Structures are given as C-alpha cells and as structure tokens.
Image (cartoon, rainbow, N blue to C red):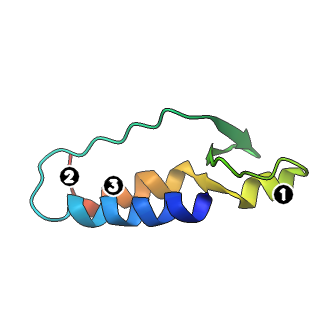
Amino acid sequence: SVKEMDLQLGEFGAKLTVGYEVGLFFFAGHGMQIDGVNYLTAVDTDFNREVDAKYSSLPLNKVIDTMEAAGTR
C-alpha cells in the first residue's frame, strides 16, 4: 500500500542520516506521470480516476527529497 511505501521511505531516510556516504534507491515496480509529476504505484493504487491514482501513489519527488535531506551522495 502507499501507506506502507511511505512508512518504509521514512525508515530508509532515517537510516541514511546515520553516517552512510552513499544512498541507493531501487524500485522494481510500475510508475506513472500525471500533470508532469512522476509517481510510484502501489499494489493497491486506485486507477478508477486520475485523481484517485494520484493520491493513492507515492510521489517520486518525495523519494528524491528524502534522499537529498539525508545528505548522502
């Protein structure tokens, strides 16, 4: 679920802040783009309407922001 993905991303971001020099994120799943924004789809993403798909997926920018905030390469 997107809730679980978000929780795991938070844990990943916290681990990156404890002295790692390099962080790597790999996603073996599906993604989509809506209005120029990229999203990682969850197993339960709701594709009934575009707005539902958007708000039941994880924005890729959140992953990028999490990694940048950790200060790793």
Q: Which mark is residue 72?
A: 2
Calculate the distance from the C-alpha at mark 3 to the C-alpha at mark 1.
26 Å
Labelled pair 2, 1 in contact (Cβ < 8 Å): no
Q: Which residue is mark 3?
A: 67
Q: Which mark is residue 61?
A: none
Calculate the distance from the C-alpha at mark 3 to the C-alpha at mark 2.
7 Å
What type is the residue that disc 3 sits on? Answer: Met
x%, y% of residue 38? Answer: 63, 43
Indicate left or right for 4 with 11 as reference. Answer: right
Q: Compared to 20, does 70 lie above or below?
A: below
Calculate the distance from the C-alpha at mark 2 to the C-alpha at mark 1.
33 Å
Helix, strand or loop for disc 2 = loop
Mark positioned earlier in the residue sequence (3 or 1): 1
x%, y% of residue 41? Answer: 64, 45
x%, y% of residue 72? Answer: 20, 52
The picture quadrant where one finds residue 36 is top right
Mark 1 nearby-residue class (10 Å; few <14, some 14–19, many ≥20)? few
Mark positioned earlier in the residue sequence (2 or 1): 1
Q: Compared to 7, does 59 lie above or below?
A: above
x%, y% of residue 68? Answer: 32, 56
Q: Compared to 45, does 10 lie above or below?
A: below
Q: Compared to 7, does 49 lie above or below?
A: above
What type is the residue that disc 2 sits on? Answer: Thr
Mark 3 nearby-residue class (10 Å; few <14, some 14–19, many ≥20)? many
What type is the residue that disc 1 sits on? Answer: Val
Helix, strand or loop for disc 3 = helix
Q: Which mark is residue 51?
A: 1
Labelled pair 3, 2 in contact (Cβ < 8 Å): yes
Indicate left or right for 39 with 25 as reference. Answer: right
Helix, strand or loop for disc 1 = helix
Residue beneath the point at 59% across and 54% down = 59
Q: Foreground: 34 or 31?
A: 31
